[in-house]
Image (cartoon, helix red, strand yellow):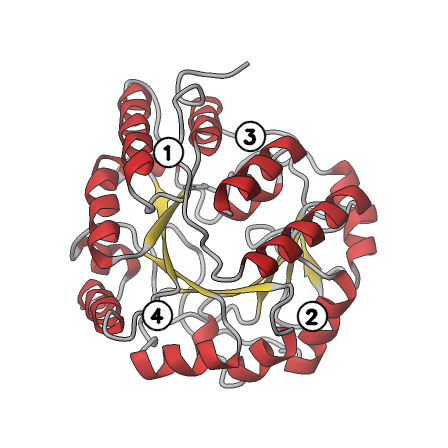
Amino acid sequence: METQIERRPEARRRAFLKSPGRSLLLGGRGLKNYLLNKPLAISFEITHACNANCRHCHLGGPFEENRATARDYGRICRELKPVIAQLSGGEPLLRRDLDDIVREFRVPNRPPYIVITTNAARLTAQRYAQLRQAGVDEFSISLDYPDERHDDFRGIPGLFGKIDGLIKGLSASGDKAITLCCVVQRHNFRDLPRLTELARRWGVRVNFSAYTPLRTHDLDYMISGAELEEFREIALRLLDFRKDHDTVFNTGYAFDNMIRYFERGGFPRCRTGDRFCNVNPDGTFSPCGLIITRHPTLRDLRDKFARTNTCAFCLTSIRSNCEKPLWRSARDMVESL
């Protein structure tokens, strides 16, 4: 049944991809993977090391780990053929061979769509240009507050100013393949309209993802009680903004599910292994970045974890978007063309 948010009309967005032909190829790959029960998105966590100390995360600092080569990751990507190949961590820009990994994934004008998820502390305009040349389609930059509170939340002094300077500096080139990624939690949800307006001024988009306690087991960040109705009203404001500006990535469907997640304290029927999965730094497979396992193949992950998985304690962006029903995915694809 549609809820109050989903019934509100949504604006038609401009194409986020510059090539309509590639958009259709990505859509075709998505339909094929959906019907064949293959992952739509794979997050390659190429390192668990990180230069941040985020309040909502269990990672941070150096990390002793075995790391697969760029060729190893490329082989996995070619075998599984995801629509989206996300390079994440930890902090992926700590890998010295990041450009080589991107080049292994890249197939000019065809899938996969390559995303780097980063805190941007090491992302300069020069590094941005190098990675774009290597084949990166989009940078997903974490941003939790529309001001210097972000520095404290991520444990990196001056980080907000650096992100501000980077994005403004890219304006001259006209190339800002950036989406801000904001983890929604009880201490920042009232700032979401300000953050959305900031994204509009910067000329980028913003994608909201729900906080999960799986990393730190801290329930203080969960939105609950009377705050839920306030969050619902803010979500409606963001959707109104979305009708007039190509800024907010999330649809009413996504916000509805996010509200249900906070209401219930979880979201059942996780489809890890079928709709999405993670590849660890050493090339083995995990259900996600929150539950680390060492399955040698995707089939092993499916047989030994996914088939009996009852975890309901997240609604990350990758899960939210990959678990959409086919009719919803098709509708969103049409809106993007």
Residue that numbered label 3 is attached to: 267
Residue that numbered label 2 is attached to: 283
Instruction: Decide: is 151 above or below 264.
Output: below
How dense is the environment of label 2, judged by Cα within 10 Å: few (below 14), some, or many (20 and up)? many
Question: Can I make out residue 214 in this image?
Answer: no
Marks 1, 3: nearer the viewer: 3
Cα distance in 3D space between marks 4 and 2: 32 Å
Q: Choose the circle earlier in sequence order: 2 or 3.
A: 3
Marks 1, 4: nearer the viewer: 4
Q: Choose the circle earlier in sequence order: 4 or 3.
A: 4
Residue that numbered label 1 is attached to: 222
Cα distance in 3D space between marks 2 and 1: 32 Å
Cα distance in 3D space between marks 1 and 4: 36 Å
Marks 4, 3: nearer the viewer: 4
- Mark linked to residue 175: 4
190 lies left or right of 289: left
